[in-house]
Amino acid sequence: MHRRNLFVASTALAAASLAGPASGQQAAPVAGTGNVIFFHPDGFGVNHWGATRFVHVGPDGRLNWDRLPHAAVYLGHMKDGLTGTSHGGATVHAFGVRVQADSFGMDGTTPIRSASGFDGSIAREAMAAGKWVGLVNSGAAYEPGTAVFVASTERRNSLAEITRLVAESGVQVHLAGGERWYLPRGVQGRFGEGAREDGLNLVEMLRSRGYTIVYTKEELAALPADATRVWGIFAHDHTFHDRPEEELAQRNLPHYVPTAPSVAEMAAAALRILSRAPQGFFLVVEEEGTDNFGNVNNAPGSIEAGIRADEAIGLLRRYVDANPNTLLLTCADSDAGGMQVIGPGRGQQAIREGQNLPERDRNGAPLDGQRGTGTTAWLSAPDRAGQRHPFAIAWSTLTDVSGGILVRGAGLNAHLIAEAGTMDNIDVYRLMYRTLFGRAIG
């Protein structure tokens, strides 16, 4: 047998516990049905988590992400390319079908069914089965990491259409930014003027459908205990300012909108509501800043987004520990910007504590310090010996790369992640489906 065939055979055997019968066969019932929480730190690879660890807890410390007990290598290629896209990758996660990279709930411009045969995403199928669905995103409502689970369009940049489809979806809880696409042009909202050209006022529509609408972290925290249909709109666009460090400094802007709740605060609020679902729930949570800051090579923003993502993982893990009939599954679909950490070593004598970094490495890669390119070297949190270590962050690109991605998880059926060892992007759907519906999908 050739080397490639050996690899395919071993991969198929390792993934057998996830896959079940081949496509086209009737799904077999399996044990272990419960709630699913899918947390998506968009654009965050192992290298990003490493930089976050160094800054937040030190080289000998452990993040909440590190402590998730089950892990597998994630393979995220698309139908027409090796690197996943945010909208194409989200489509694969939501439908369990490999699609073209330029896809938003479709295969390019062709409608698709889920791998289960259902005419809609796994979230749509969950709602059809009586389960409550929640979507949480630190980005705007049109961001594909959550929107693709309830919206399908031919073009990713159809922002008004996507926001309308999300607002009409009927999900129990939706918390994100993006107010400008809820309101008609000329109508003033809480954060700015609307941008819709069709005259629709989606805020009024949501209120007429029984949603309580909140705009700040204080309003979210003050929700009545019996609230069951909640819609959060926390910023004009994203709840963060995804610009390079130097531009944010010039405009005196923080990385995140101060009045908006963090992704962990949003997830906590969503769980308070969804945990009352009589037939269980499906929650999708995305930290979008982990992707967008990487795509503008903003190292401080990327690490702050990573710390926020890790806080959310800690909160979600505590929920799963207290509610063991729940699966927590987390992965990215690509690596934003190709971030790498460079510590002092041979040829890197310029990386010293308290000193400015050179603007570029010897191969031309930009080097980021604590305030941007060519600024003071980063300094890790103390190691076991109390020592702090200087380092630089290098960027390889402004786009997404395949990178090193891990699937990690805890709770119900999460042991299947480690048993697989390597998981394809379509396997994310399979594991979520198996846990929600008790059936294995081929």
Image (cartoon, helix red, strand yellow):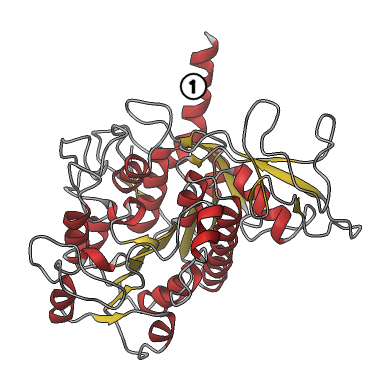
Q: Is residue 333 visible?
A: yes
Residue at the image position 85 percent from the left and 30 percent from the top: 346
Identify residue type, mark 1.
Ala
Left or right position of 74 against 436: right
Q: Residue farthest to the front?
A: 250
Q: Residue farthest to the left?
A: 199
Decide: few, some or many residues near mark 1? Use Cα within 10 Å; few <14, some 14-19, many ≥20: few
| Residue highlighted by disc 1 | 9
Residue at the image position 39 percent from the left and 52 percent from the top: 432
Q: Position of residue 244 (x, y in %)?
A: 51, 51
Residue at the image position 66 percent from the left and 57 percent from the top: 67
Q: Vertically, is 131 above or below 103? A: below
Look at the numbered disc 1 and give the secondary structure of its residue. Answer: helix
Check the picture and name the quadrant holding the C terminus. Answer: top left
Closer-to-camera residue (330/42): 42
Left or right position of 29 against 195: right
Q: Position of residue 123 (x, y in %)?
A: 28, 57
Closer-to-camera residue (101/300): 300
Q: Position of residue 436 (x, y in %)?
A: 35, 58
